[in-house]
Structures are given as C-alpha cells and as structure tokens.
Image (tube, rainbow, N blue to C red):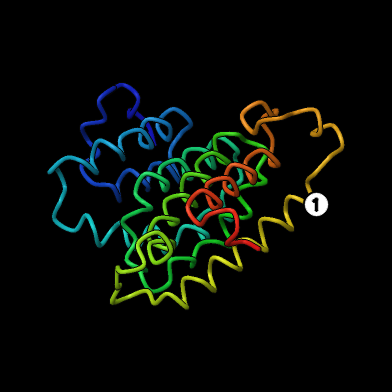
Amino acid sequence: MTGITENKNNTYLNTIKECFDVILSGEKEDSRLAARKVRRLLYSSRGSGNKFGDIKNIVNSAPGNYVIITESWRQENFVSAVSVIYYLHDREVQPDFLFPWLFQLLEHKSGTVRYAAVRMFINELGPLTVHIRVPEYKSERLKPEQADRILQALFVSLNNMLARLWEPKYKRYKYINSLPANPYKSVQMVMAELEEYCGKDYGK
C-alpha cells in the first residue's frame, strides 16, 4: 500500500475496519498512523454506519488475526488498536472469552503490548466484580456465580504466572511501580487491580 503517509491526517480512512485493514497489511508508518486513527474514529460520527458491527467482528477475530502477524511493530499497532475498542465487545455473558489471548500478551517482549493487555484485563474487572462491590446490584446477563468462577480462575492463572516468572532479584523491590519493565511486573499490575476490586481476602 503506497501513498498513505503523504496524507498525515489519513483522511482516506473513514472506518475502523479500514484502519485495521491497514494495520494488518500496510507499510510500517501507514500501520502506525492507522492504529492512532482508530481512537479518533471511535469517538467521532464518521463512518458510524456499521461501526459497532465492525468492532464486534474485529474483537472476536483478534486472536486469529494476531497469530498470523510476524512483525513485532505490527503486533504492537494491532494490540494497541484492539485495546481501544475492546470494551465495546458484546460478550457480556462471556467476558473472559479473550483471556487466553491476553495471558499470552502479558508475556510479550514489548512493553506496549503488555500494557495494552493489562488495560484490557482491567477493563473487565468492573463488570466481573460489581456483585462483590455492590451486593444489591442485579445483572440480567452475568450471574454472580458465573462471575465468581471467572474471578477464581483468574486468581489461579495469575498466581501460577507469578510463580513461574518470579526471580530472586525482585525481592529488593517494595512497590510494583518500582519493578523493572517485564512480564512479571505486568502480571503483578493485573493482580493488584484484581485484589483492589475484590478485596484481598477474596482470593483466599
């Protein structure tokens, strides 16, 4: 794809779907600009005809599209762009449907990818923990027992990852923010938010 970077505003990109087409197949700079354009299109009225239908399809197919990406810079662009629209997925009754992919992303060598995965995990914690924080709230889609099963599985998976990724040198760091940027820190960030939402005793 050529001639895209000459137009710095990417006015030819009118829909989120077009942005993702370029993210996945365009040249390096074109892909980067298209990833940045996703946020602007999301919060604008341009290309709103089938915006949410496109978002549903993009999010649902994200793991499959990601696995065929070979360039690390394209992986960064793709995951960052997905993280912008992820909260609009329509899987309220199955909010953990992308968790296996997100766990994979938490161990990516790129901090950009890991941070995007952290954001997507945290995005799900509000709806998953509302029955703990606001017991009187009743959800018609996600039952408390279903949310509990997902949360408990999340606690187990995160603890297993922390045990596997831990190194003795991490003892010297008192706070998560002071840890060096690496997968262990990213997993700790998700765990800290999970404990904040659930309360520290919930995981026990």
The residue that disc 1 covers is 164
Q: Where is residue 133 in the image (x, y as percent from the top left)?
A: 40, 59
- Residue at image position (47%, 52%) is 197
Residue drawn 25% across the image and 39% down it: 13
Q: Provide residue 161's location: percent of width, then percent of height.
A: 72, 54
Q: Is residue 115 left or right of residue 40?
A: right
150 in relation to 54, above or below: below
**Around disc 1, counting alpha carbons within 10 Å, would you say few (fewer than 14), some (14 to 19), or many (20 or more)?**
few
- Return the x and y of residue 202 as percentages of the image width and height: 57, 62
Task: Give 195 or 27, whichever is nearer the viewer.
Answer: 195
x 54%, y 61%: residue = 99
Q: What residue type is labelled 1?
A: Arg
Q: State the image quarter where residue 111 is shown.
A: top right
Image quarter in which the C terminus is found: bottom right
Residue 84, position in %: x, y? 37, 44
* Image quadrant assignment for residue 52: bottom left
Kindly identify the residue that appears in the image at 79 percent across and 34 percent down.
170
Residue closest to the eye, 65 or 38: 38
Which of the 4 image quarters holds residue 45? Answer: top left
Location of the N terminus (image quadrant)? top left
As drawn, is 123 to the left or to the right of 76?
Answer: left
Give SS at disc 1: helix
